[in-house]
Image (spheres, helix red, strand yellow):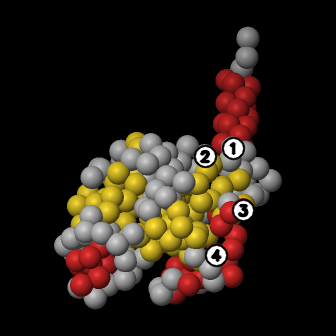
Amino acid sequence: MLRSSSVSFLNSLFARFEHSQKNTVNTMVSAPVDGDAFALSAVADTAFSSGMLGTGIAFTPESCDTVEVVSPVAGRITALFPHAFALLTSQGAEVLVHVGIDTVELHGKYFEQLAEKDSVVQVNEPIIRYNPTAVAAAGFENTVILTVLNPGEFSCATLIEELKSIETGATFPVTKGASVMCIKGGCGARQN
């Protein structure tokens, strides 16, 4: 029969093992919109272009009156605003999708939320619908930004090989749902 201190120790050990295994799985991150991908460093908002809000990629969505922004990963919606949302994957990656530059100033105008905070969503599930034509006419940039907010907890969060050319200023056409980044778990994972 195990003593309670032994059971406690084993539970602690298994919890650490589970957490360390969490970050060993690779997570593919998909494009949330159709459009042209470009380097995060070229985004007109220094909070994103400086990398202060994580590692990522940006998109110029296709020109049309309605765009559905989809979840780039499977996970739980931890924050939801008319112009942005954050997800937490089962591996612990925190992923942010932000629609437009300074679009918080629109107070939800031209945006529609298609999901609820704390919902568990799958890859390519619609989260936000918006009108890029109206957003641009109101004087705001339509850039859609995708970042991994906690890249330091993983061995790396990088663009897939086919998109490496955008780091030199090129753009690359992508379709919604296509893989654009890989979050690799393992050696860089933080242990609690």
Quarter of the N terminus within the rendering: top right
Q: Quadrant of residue 143?
A: bottom left
The kind of residue on which mark 2 rests is Gln
The kind of residue on which mark 3 rests is Glu
Query: At 40% from the left edge and 42% from the top edge, which residue is drawn?
Result: 120
Query: At 44% from the left edge and 62% from the top edge, which residue is drawn?
Result: 34
* Along the viewing direction, whichever of 180 and 62 lies nearer the viewer: 62
Q: Circle 4 sits in a helix, a strand or a loop, which is it? A: helix
What residue is shown with label 2?
Answer: 91
Q: Nearer the viewer, mark 1 or mark 2?
A: 1
Could you tell me if residue 118 is visible in this image?
A: yes
What residue is shown with label 3?
Answer: 161
Name of the residue lying farthest toward the top: 1
Q: Nearer the viewer, mark 4 or mark 1?
A: 4
Position of residue 16 measured from the top left corner of the image (x, y, whole percent)? 70, 40
What residue is shown with label 4?
Answer: 166
Q: Circle 1 sits in a helix, a strand or a loop, which is it? A: loop
- The mark nearer the N terminus, 4 or 2, is 2
Cβ–Cβ below 8 Å for labels 1 and 2? yes
> What is the CA distance from the residue labelled 4 to the residue labelled 3?
10 Å
What residue is shown with label 1?
Answer: 25
> What is the CA distance from the residue labelled 1 to the residue labelled 2?
7 Å
Q: Is 162 left or right of 104, judged from the image as shown?
A: right
- The mark nearer the N terminus, 4 or 3, is 3
Cβ–Cβ below 8 Å for labels 4 and 2? no
Circle 2 residues within 10 Å: few <14, some 14–19, many ≥20 = many
> What is the CA distance from the residue labelled 3 to the residue labelled 1?
19 Å
Circle 4 residues within 10 Å: few <14, some 14–19, many ≥20 = many
- The mark nearer the N terminus, 1 or 2, is 1
Q: Circle 3 sits in a helix, a strand or a loop, which is it? A: helix
